[in-house]
Amino acid sequence: MKYGYIENPRPLPEVLHQLRTYIGELPERLRGFSEEELRYRKPGKWSRKEILGHLIDSGLNNLKRFTDAQILPPPYEVQRYDQNQSVVFNRYQDLPLEHLLTYWQSLNRQILYVTEVIPEETLRQPVIPPGDSQTVTLLWLIDDYVAHLGHHFKQI
């Protein structure tokens, strides 16, 4: 598979439990860094603030995906977005940490509200990831989103 962080999706309650854990732990972790540490960039990499900004962009895009996949006829086709330009244009490096954290937590709480009530039948609907011809399920897409958070959580 060309796209994603997982192969086989976990049950939805397990995925959402992990998301709730990240919502609680990520702010605590980031508040432990100085502003200088939050803004520091290795060459060609994002700073901690920019990683958080990327996770905000991911949350925005995935909230729309999780919603649209329930509305549009299957298979739902996931659209890519320009991650690097989005981080630049949203100026995450220059924004206060508390603003970024509040924004990120609110988005992910909304993702919880949307995903925790998706019927089992809908979770099995086919989804086409970007750049891949193999279909996955909506559950896979949700689990992959949370796994993506975990990938960046380790970078922070």
Image (cartoon, helix red, strand yellow):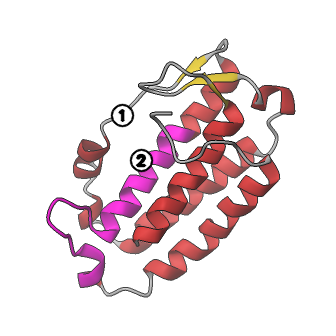
CA separation, marks 1 and 2? 9 Å
Q: Quick one: which residue is furthest to the left in this view?
A: 43
66 or 96: nearer the eye? 66
Secondary structure state at the residue bearing disc 1: loop
Indicate the quadrant where residue 117 lies: top right
Give the residues drawn in magenta, as a range: 36-62
Residue drawn at the location 53% of the way across and 81% of the way down:
28
Disc 2 marks which residue? 57
Going by the numbered disc 1, the residue's amino acid type is: Tyr
Q: Do the residues labelled 1 and 2 touch (CB within 8 Å)?
A: yes
**Disc sitting over residue 34 in the figure:** none
Image position, residue 53 (x, y; %): 37, 57
| Direction from residue 138 to residue 107 in the image, left or right | left
Residue drawn at the location 31% of the way across and 62% of the way down:
50
Q: Is residue 120 visible?
A: yes
| Direction from residue 45 to residue 133 in the image, left or right | right
Eyeballing the image, is 16 above or below 119?
below
Eyeballing the image, is 125 above or below 59?
above
The 10 Å Cα crowd at callout 1, few under 14, some 14 to 19, many 20 or more, is few
Eyeballing the image, is 75 above or below 52?
above
Image position, residue 136 (x, y; %): 63, 28
Say whether disc 1 or disc 2 marks the residue closer to the N-terminus. Answer: 2
| Direction from residue 109 to residue 91 in the image, left or right | left
Q: Is residue 107 visible?
A: no
**Disc sitting over residue 81 in the figure:** 1
Residue drawn at the location 78% of the way across and 56% of the way down:
14
| Direction from residue 153 to residue 70 in the image, left or right | right
Q: In which quarter of the image is the C terminus?
A: bottom left
114 or 155: nearer the eye? 155
